[in-house]
Amino acid sequence: MDYDISRKPIDRTYKSCRSRALVLLIVVATNTASISILLFSDAGLSAIGNRFSGHNRCIPFKNPGNLSLRDLNVTEYALAASHAELVHLHGRLAIANALVETLLGDKANASNMAAAGDEEKQVAADSLWQRELTGELKLAVGPHKLPLGSTPNMRTEELFPTLGQACSRFPDELQRYMNYKPGGECPSDELFAQRLMLKGCEPLPRRRCRPRSPEGYVEPTPLPASLWAIPPDTSILWDAYTCKNYSCLVNRGKTTGTHHYDCKDCFNLINSREKRRWTRDDGALSYSIDAVLAAKPNGTVRIGLDIGGGSGTFAARMQERGVTVVTTSMNFDGPFNSFIASRGLVPMHLSIVHRLPFFDGTLDIVHSMHVLSHWIPDVILEFALFDIYRVLRPGGLFWLDHFYCLGGQMNTTYVPMFDRIGFNKVRWNARPKLDRGIKFDEWYLSALLGKPST
């Protein structure tokens, strides 16, 4: 797990520790002074004696021979009271000393972490967080000793299950996610889990529970008919979605008003825009799959990835041409991943900020439509583009489909960014986006980019 501890927070920790330590040292000094007064001052003992005797006078300790029985009784009560007060102050002093030692220890730890290398910082941060974990979450995070010890391949004696870097920021929510009966039924918490993912807690820890299966489940439609078939409603659970059946999803593309749906018409696979996607090439922004495949020698585009592929139609079209494409998608008020799987395609529940789970230089093609756009922070977008470059094989293709931005951003931000990545331009088309009017200065860019072979 990556966990960066920056210098500024540590400096603030020093100041906070010094401030709290100073206050507690004052408390310790005050307690010590109080104890000293009680032990070594006649006035202190007299005051306690007066508190218990009810008399506003001092006991004549200098001449014990003159003490009466009443005075001796008052003195006995005063000594008992002072002993109780002393025990109480000793307790307060011990607590104050422990707090000071803790704060000074935290300060020393912070100093050590500031001076340590990146590996020591990570270990310190991990151990600090893991001390707070309990139950299933602690078990899931690990580490776990290997039964046979270290091996030449593993070069470690323990395994750490993968967990998103930002998970440590949400310990309470993680504990809620991991609050279930081991071996029982998982909570119906798909939306909660996805929100954690979108906060950067990705991947989530594994769980030892079984998700509930839908009642009346039936076998899926066989390939190739499944590519364009609406699955039965009993194929999934509908708890997390506004629509409770596929008929509702198919028809919500016809809704008007202020409702916003992600890819609202892409569940309609019959006589719809979805059925016609990537089948024709207009020589401008809309590229056809056949034209793109023609850019490479026949049969050399075999496996690929569609980033943010909605309901999986791009992968379906590629499947018809013998190309296997994995589709990443999120379930934004719709069962996108389940729908992709029902079509006989491979879904991957993955957000845009996740490192692509493919080895370097392994994919023939990567495609993305609309998802990669100016709504993504520039730094995150550049990291994503470099990651696409990484997973493409030499000579592989990146199809950037309808990239959306403002006209002022095109040449100042994005063209220099694409140049920094290092792609070759196989095809490049930019056009104004005019559906809201020219005054908004909105543009689309479609491009076919190639990773250099050398």
Image (spheres, rainbow, N blue to C red):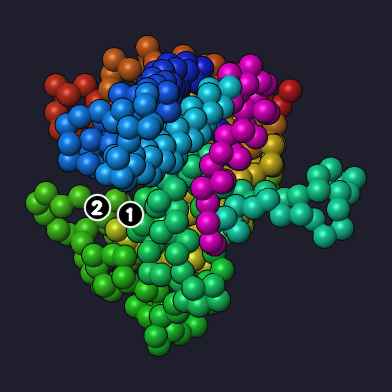
Q: Residue at x 20, y 50 (%)?
A: 260
Q: Is residue 272 left or right of residue 308?
A: left
* 104 falls in the magenta region: no
Vertical comparison of 410 with 360: above or below: above
Boundaries of the magenta span: 109-136
1 and 2 marks in contact (CB < 8 Å) = yes
Vertical comparison of 421 with 86: above or below: above
* 124 falls in the magenta region: yes
Q: Secondary structure at mark 1?
A: loop
Figure quadrant of the N terminus:
top right
How many circles with numbers are drawn on the protein?
A: 2
- Position in image of residue 245 (x %, y %): 28, 74
Q: Is residue 454 left or right of residue 161?
A: right
Residue toward you, 432 or 241: 241
For the view shown, which residue lies furthest in the left direction? 257
Looking at the image, is mark 1 or mark 2 earlier in the sequence? 2
- Position in image of residue 300 (x %, y %): 69, 44
Which residue bears the numbered disc 2?
261
Q: Residue at x 44, y 17 (%)?
A: 18
Tag 2: amino acid:
Tyr
Residue toward you, 234 or 422: 234
